[in-house]
Image: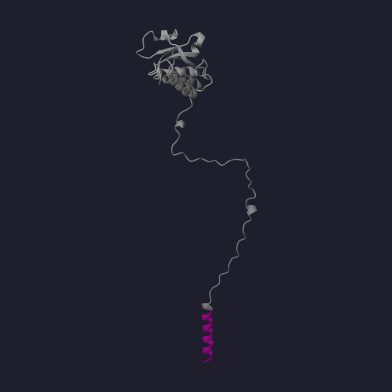
Amino acid sequence: MKPFKEQLKGFRKQARQAALPVLTPVKPPEPEPDFRALFSDVRPVKDGNRVPPYSPKPSPRPRQSDRYGQLPLELEAALLAHAVGWFEPAELERNFARNGMPAATLKRLRAGHWPVVAELDLHGLDRYQAQDTLTLFLHRAGLRGQCVRIIHGKGFGSQGEPVLKRMVRNWLKHHPEVLAFCEADERQGGSGALMVLLRRPSSPNK
């Protein structure tokens, strides 16, 4: 019986050893690389004060002016000189008589047939001041008589053209109360002044 017990102990010992987990030896971790040693041959980039490239977002509606190139100065000057006649008379009119006026009207106006009842000097005014002043003057003078003298001067603008002189003559042509005008003689201003004939007042007491 004793040998059997001894044999049974041996079986138990073997079974106990078989139940134990098999331990695998763990390898030690590899040492971490030396960062400075790995990048020892790298050189920093020099600071060149550069701005990183940046592309702005395109506008949803590109400006129309970007579609056209700038014109040469000579071509611009030629276009502007040619366009004067589109908006204002290219030639200065020395005389004007409304349709239906007698043929001798300008001759009589130049000879002083109608006495001058008022005079307006536009020197020193810009185009807007001159237009307002002229409008009021023609209304008031028309209540006193038919003939007035307007002095616009012979001055020239920055482009070498008589600015106010041209404008006043163009305004008078379109004024409903102006029947005719002509340049004054040299004693009264010459080409720098106009003799203007207005409609006859409808009532002397108006």
Residue at 49% x, 12% y: name it: 191
44 vs 81, left or right, is right
In the image, is residue 54 above or below residue 118?
Answer: below
* 1, 189: nearer the viewer: 189
In the image, is residue 151 above or below residue 57?
Answer: above
Q: In the rendering, at what x and y percent does residue 91 appear?
A: 44, 14
User: Residue furthest toward the bottom?
Assistant: 1
58 vs 49, left or right, is left
**What segment carries the magenta color?**
1-16
User: Residue furthest toward the left?
Assistant: 100
* 63, 42: nearer the viewer: 63
Q: In the rendering, at what x and y percent does residue 183 appear?
A: 46, 11
7 vs 41, left or right, is left
Main structural element of the magenta stretch: helix, strand or loop? helix
Q: Give the position of the C terminus as an image quadrant.
A: top left
In reply to whether residue 15 is colored magenta, the answer given is yes
